[in-house]
Image (cartoon, coloured by chain):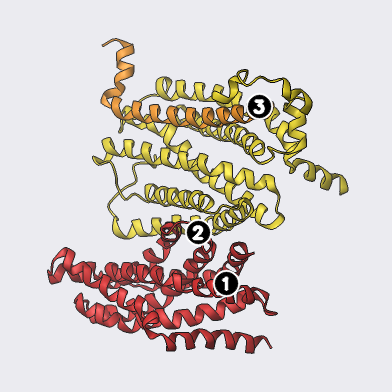
Amino acid sequence: MSVIKEYWHKLSSAKHFYPIAGALLPWFLIPALLMLIWGSWQGLVVAPADYQQGDSYRIIFVHVPAAWLSMMAYMVMAINGAIYLVWKIKLADIVAESAAPIGASFTFLALATGSLWGKPMWGTWWVWDARLTSELVLLFLYLGTIALRGAIDDRQRAGRAAGLLGLVGAINVPIIHFSVEWWETLHQPATVSKFSAPSMHSSMLTPLLVMALAFTLFFFAVLMVKIRAGILEQERHSRWLSALYAEAPETTTTYSPEGEPGRNG
Amino acid sequence: MITTALYKQFSREMLGAVRQPGDALAPVVFYLIVGMLFPLALGSDPRLLAQIGPGAIWIAALLAVLLSLHKLFRSDLDNGYLDQLLLMPCPLFLLIGARLLAHWLQTGLPMLLVTPLLAESFGLDYALLPVLLSALALGTPVLLLLGAINEALTLTSRGGALLALLVLPLYVPTLVFGSGAVYAVYFGENPAGHLSLLAALALITLLFAPWAVATALRISID
Amino acid sequence: MSPMSEFFAMGGYAIYVWSAWGLTALVMTANLLLPLRQCRKLRIELEQPE
């Protein structure tokens, strides 16, 4: 029991997680890139054109993974925000803060690619389709948490406020999703969602799943980088970081002012 | 002990409204004015007005509740009463609940009372009125409670439009179920499904929101 | 039509398909490179304190 506790304590401390995040990065990034390349090749070249939508359906290989990631990133953000709210683990706050912009950018991507798909399929850039609408609401939820964090100067208070807001949002996301679907069946009974393929051939389904997995791994790769940046930012003045990177204090005087290439770049 | 504290909290809020009735009435007047803007923007075609009426009334209600939120905690934050509230030997979420109830009686209830006026100005069928009123009666507390969480969160932060950005996305389900109930009757269908969803939403919000408001206040003030 | 230009034509949907994929590439690249650059900047600051 105490071993597990100690393990979690270590894992959740910024000092210990910093090197772990660095070590994990290639394990997320390299498979993600390989799968992205393979999935793109399969999705763009190998998979046959759809008998109804022609080649335009190939947007699915980026649209659906982006939409999936937008939801998953929100959950990662909300869970870590809640952890920070309850246990005040600094690392969880850094994770929540890091996940929000990634999630927001992929929500935007899901909306943009959905719109690019909708134009040839529906004839307009925007249709009040249930999925697009709830993605739009999700984007506003992301922007809200990011804005709330930005509006509070005190780091600890900003983290707790964003954590609570994320929690409220996480309870509301399924309700919003359900309500928008309920709304669509009421107001547009004739519209058939073009995004739902009744039966997908494996030559299309496999690349789609691979792309979804690739996006997920990519998210965690970016998250690791952002966590490292967040730790560097927050623990700037801590001793362990100076010990890791800076020269010993007395040697710093040997630096001449013109010998500082990094400060301009 | 707790009941007297709650009663005191409640009556304090109600007395404030009696002493300054203009403050309490502003959201109701706002509600009527927004309702009036729709015919001015869209023209006076009676058929069109009757069709957009339920949705327009819901949007007016939503904005009126949003506008009323700044009265919840701001003045008590300035005069220091809120700090005392946090120290009271009584669960904060109950005190918050009493306060929110008083707030709803001052804004939500008057809005319900003037809704028939708005409905008449849109030329809504009288058959819609009971559903519209019950949907608003279930929906406005949800709007108020969700708004109160975010108002408490943004109490000591910068930025004026932030509250609306945080709150409005959360209002989507209430708006969908609430106006959906009225439109169900409008199209000759049964509104029971919408109303029960709205009631479920109200129940969930009533259970969780006072706790969330209390937590948010502690975050903002501590 | 050569197979290559046929591939880029995407059955007449070239604008939509390629802008969707291009946008995705852009967003993903930015997501990866910006934090990497920030990380490097912070590290350099740490290595060379004033």
Check disc 3: other Cα within 10 Å, few if <14, some if 14-19, many if 20+. few
Give the quadrant of residue C14: top left
Q: Is residue A171 left or right of residue A116?
A: right
SS at mark 1 in the image:
helix
Give the quadrant of residue A163: bottom right
Check disc 1: other Cα within 10 Å, few if <14, some if 14-19, many if 20+. many
Chain under callout 1: B
Residue A43 location (% of width, % of height): 43, 25
Residue A73 location (% of width, % of height): 55, 43
Q: Are marks 3 and 1 in contact (CB under 8 Å)?
A: no
* Chain letter corresponding to the colour yellow: A
Residue A86 location (% of width, % of height): 69, 57
* Chain letter corresponding to the colour orange: C
Res B184 visible = no
SS at mark 2 in the image:
helix
Q: Are marks 2 and 3 in contact (CB under 8 Å)?
A: no
- The answer to whether dots 1 and 2 both sit on one chain is no
- Please say if A232 is above or below B10: above
Task: List the single residue furthest toward the top.
Answer: C2
Callout 2 amino acid: Asn
Disc 3: which residue: A27
How far is disc 3 from disc 1 in space, using C-alphas? Answer: 44 Å
SS at mark 3 in the image:
helix
Disc 2: which residue: A172
Callout 1 amino acid: Pro
Res A152 visible = yes
Residue A176 location (% of width, % of height): 45, 57
How far is disc 2 from disc 3 in space, using C-alphas? Answer: 34 Å
* The colour assigned to chain B within the rendered structure: red
Q: Is residue A247 left or right of residue B162?
A: right
Residue at x 58% of width, y 57% of height = A161
Name the mark on residue B210.
1
